[in-house]
Image (tube, rainbow, N blue to C red):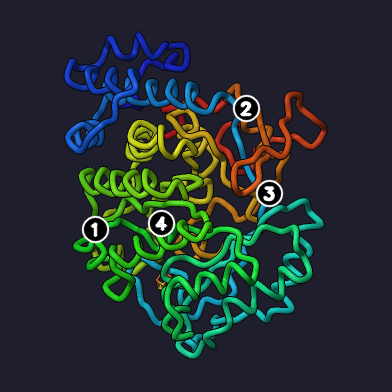
């Protein structure tokens, strides 16, 4: 297993790692290095590797990352705005939602969301990410009006808002067609859509996780329509619950096919299942989140399956923790996500890696793995590259098991 790998793994070249792998796995990895597109069988084989084969997968994914996007490691200065935790949908994996009468149910006013947005801009943010639960009594025009209110005061701020589930709900509530509803959001200032509510794009798995959630076909319809109207989105996948490697691969192939048609995905973000406060786990219906090896495999596999079409693979430090995120950033990923400033969804499900990180902390961590920090906008346009360390750069040592260099396979 990876934990027993040669501790000098970082000095091992991808060629050396390939020479240690079993021949069938090495052949698939070589195919990827030659630029050939990997298919379902290739992906499933890679999804189950261990030991030296896993080492080879990680090293080849890192090499492909280097060839595709170079050695800049990006992040965005952003803030999450979760406007309400009231939701009727009842997803079994969700620790965030509350009934409307729960003691800790909340619905933030537009005034307070605007104040948080202003505060974020003052702290250097270029994006707010707006998502919430689905309250039964939400007014149909709520989504567009919220965007309009923030956009009117902060026109430079990128509004990354509303999952396909919320878009679908807004469409039902307004009675508009999907395209018209999306156009009304665009007119109100939406810049892009989080590609969340994807979980695993397989209706059988979704039936176990969230039977009331939008079906795969509707998720695809929302995303394709948004892309067609010039509204880009991210793409995500939740793993570490009831799914198997073949589900990961089908999910990635589906995203790849959409991207070939629309070009509208800005990034792919694997999201490890945070289990402890969820009904799905408590009832024994899911495993306890992903293992470290699975985290590496999923990020590396994404690089190999998607690199030519979705070149940006993001880590979620909220789910992985900083050491896990830094490991995955050496296994094919190239984006550290954002500063977040506040985070409610993973925390409510049991994540304890914090809900905010400073830009200088991200940059300091990026340097520990020999890469160059670069702040980006939501769309991956680079805002500035930090070739040299500055006085703001400091490791968040209290949230890392070891200060300084974070070796893969050590400390887990
Ligand atoms: S995941 Fe979203 S839609 Fe599902 S219960 Fe939680 S808040 Fe509601």
Position of 9 compared to 36: left or right?
right
Q: Nearer the viewer, mark 1 or mark 2?
A: 1
Q: Which residue is mark 4?
A: 274
- At mark 3, the secondary structure is loop
- At mark 1, the secondary structure is loop
Q: Quadrant of ligand 1?
A: bottom left
- Please state the horizontal and vertical placement of residue 360, each as a whole percent of the image: 73, 39
**Residue beneath the point at 28% across and 68% down:** 215
N-terminal of the pair, mark 1 or mark 2, is 1
Q: Which residue is mark 2?
A: 404
Position of 134 compared to 392: left or right?
left
Q: Which residue is mark 3?
A: 77
N-terminal of the pair, mark 3 or mark 4, is 3
Q: Quadrant of the C terminus?
A: top left
- At mark 4, the secondary structure is loop
Q: Which residue is mark 1?
A: 202
Q: CA distance from mark 2 to mark 4?
A: 26 Å
């Amino acid at each position: 297993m990876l934990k027993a790998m040669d501790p000098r793994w970082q000095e091992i070249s991808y060629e050396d790692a390939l020479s240690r792998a079993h021949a069938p796995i090495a052949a698939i990895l070589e195919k990827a290095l030659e630029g050939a597109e990997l298919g379902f069988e290739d992906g499933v084989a890679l999804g189950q590797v261990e030991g030296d084969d896993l080492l080879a997968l990680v090293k080849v994914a890192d090499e492909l990352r280097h060839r595709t996007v170079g050695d800049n490691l990006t992040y965005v200065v952003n803030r999450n705005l979760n406007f309400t935790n009231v939701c009727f949908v009842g997803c079994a994996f969700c620790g965030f939602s509350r009934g409307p009468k729960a003691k800790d149910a909340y619905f933030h006013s537009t005034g307070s969301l605007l104040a948080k947005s202003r505060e974020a801009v003052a702290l250097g943010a270029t994006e707010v990410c707006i998502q919430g639960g689905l309250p039964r009594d939400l007014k149909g025009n709520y989504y567009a009006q919220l965007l309009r209110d923030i956009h009117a005061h902060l026109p430079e701020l990128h509004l990354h808002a509303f999952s396909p589930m919320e878009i679908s709900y807004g469409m039902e509530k307004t009675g508009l067609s999907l395209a018209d509803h999306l156009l009304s959001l665009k007119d109100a200032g939406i810049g892009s859509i989080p590609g969340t509510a994807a979980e695993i794009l397989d209706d059988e798995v979704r039936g176990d996780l969230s039977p009331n959630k939008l079906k795969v076909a509707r998720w695809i319809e929302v995303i394709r329509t948004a892309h067609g109207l010039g509204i880009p989105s991210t793409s995500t996948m939740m793993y570490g619950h009831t799914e198997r490697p073949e589900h990961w691969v089908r999910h990635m192939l589906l995203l790849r096919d959409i991207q070939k048609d629309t070009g509208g995905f800005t990034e792919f973000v694997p999201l490890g299942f945070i289990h402890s406060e969820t009904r799905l786990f408590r009832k024994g219906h899911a495993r306890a989140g992903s293992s470290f090896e699975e985290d590496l495999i999923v990020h590396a596999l994404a690089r190999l399956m998607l690199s030519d079409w979705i070149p940006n693979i993001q880590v979620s430090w909220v789910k992985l923790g900083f050491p896990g995120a830094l490991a995955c950033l050496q296994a094919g990923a190239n984006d550290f996500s954002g500063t977040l400033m506040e985070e409610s969804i993973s925390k409510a499900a049991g994540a304890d890696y914090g809900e905010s990180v400073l830009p200088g902390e991200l940059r300091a961590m990026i340097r520990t793995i020999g890469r160059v920090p670069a702040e980006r906008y939501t769309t991956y346009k680079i805002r500035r590259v930090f070739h040299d360390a500055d006085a703001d750069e400091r490791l968040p040592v209290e949230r890392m098991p070891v200060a300084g260099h974070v070796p893969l396979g050590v400390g887990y």
